[in-house]
Every structure is written in C-alpha cells, then in structure tokens.
Image: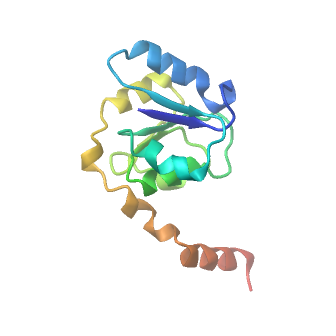
Amino acid sequence: VLFTNAWGEKEIKGFKHWNWLKKNNPDINFKELLGNKSLEYMPDFYNSGNCLLFLSLWPETCGLVILEALACDIPVISYPVGIAREIIKNGENGYLIDDYNIKSVNESIHLINKNKYNCRDSIKELNIENTCVKYIEFLGE
C-alpha cells in the first residue's frame, strides 16, 4: 500500500491517518514517499504497490498523484477532495471514502485486488485535446 506526500509529515495531508493504518495492519506492506522527488522516480514508486492512498484532508484543487497512480494502472483509495470526486469510481479504479473515516479506508484496502481494475482506461478522456476543449467550452470563445 502506497502513500506519497510532497509536504512531508503534515496532518492536513493525511499523515496521521497513514500512521494509524500502518500501526493497525502489521500484515500489510506499506511504502511511503515523503517530500519532493524527481519525476523519473515516480513510475517505479507507483508500480511497487497494489494501491495508492490519497488521504488529504486539505481541499485539493487536483491531486495529481491520483492521476499519476491511475496512469500506472494502480487503483486509488481517496477522500473526496480535488479530482478524486470526479474520477474515482468505487470498485472500478479504486474507492472514494466520502465519510473521511479511516476505518472505511482500512476496509477498502482489504477489498483491493490490483488485477481486477483497468485504471488507465478510467483517465483516457483526460488527454490534452479533450482537456483543451473543456477549457474552451468553460471559458467561452
């Protein structure tokens, strides 16, 4: 189970929840990446796990790590912040935890079977062409 956070050990970014999960699941292999890392490192990090936890309590604008993980075909368990509300579909590419309850996250971790998801397909519509069209539609001509 993966967790990454460029801000480090910040409670607002879910670090306290991350520590609770590690403490209460000694049978699970957890891997964290805290602080900034070069982009070249990230695919290996994502591909070293079965799922990514996005536990931010902060009102994210996007949550790029969600898209990066899905692009690496890694399901995501997330609170409903940023792009997570739009892109995470329960049981299809991960799980959206609407109640911000760490016990719900814990239950979802045990539902993850990396091989049953096709996460890349869930973000194909987010290519540059489609995104530009949506921006133009939003802003008007």
Residue 128 falls left or right of residue 24: right
| Quadrant location, the C terminus | bottom right
The answer to which of 68 and 131 lies nearer the viewer is: 68
The answer to which of 62 and 10 lies nearer the viewer is: 10
Residue 138 falls left or right of residue 99: right
The residue shown at (66%, 25%) is 9
The residue shown at (41%, 32%) is 1
Residue 102 falls left or right of residue 109: right
Q: Quadrant of residue 50?
A: top left
Q: Is residue 37 above or below residue 137?
A: above
User: Does the image show residue 135?
Assistant: yes
Q: Position of residue 94 (x, y in %)?
A: 39, 45
Q: Position of residue 73 (x, y in %)?
A: 37, 53
Label tally: 0
Q: Is residue 78 above or below residue 141?
A: above
Q: Position of residue 126 (x, y in %)?
A: 52, 67
Q: Is residue 81 above or below residue 35?
A: below
Q: Position of residue 87 (x, y in %)?
A: 49, 55
In the image, farthest residue toward the bottom: 141
User: Does the image show residue 84?
Assistant: no
The residue shown at (39%, 60%) is 120
The residue shown at (63%, 52%) is 62
Q: How is the image coloured?
A: rainbow
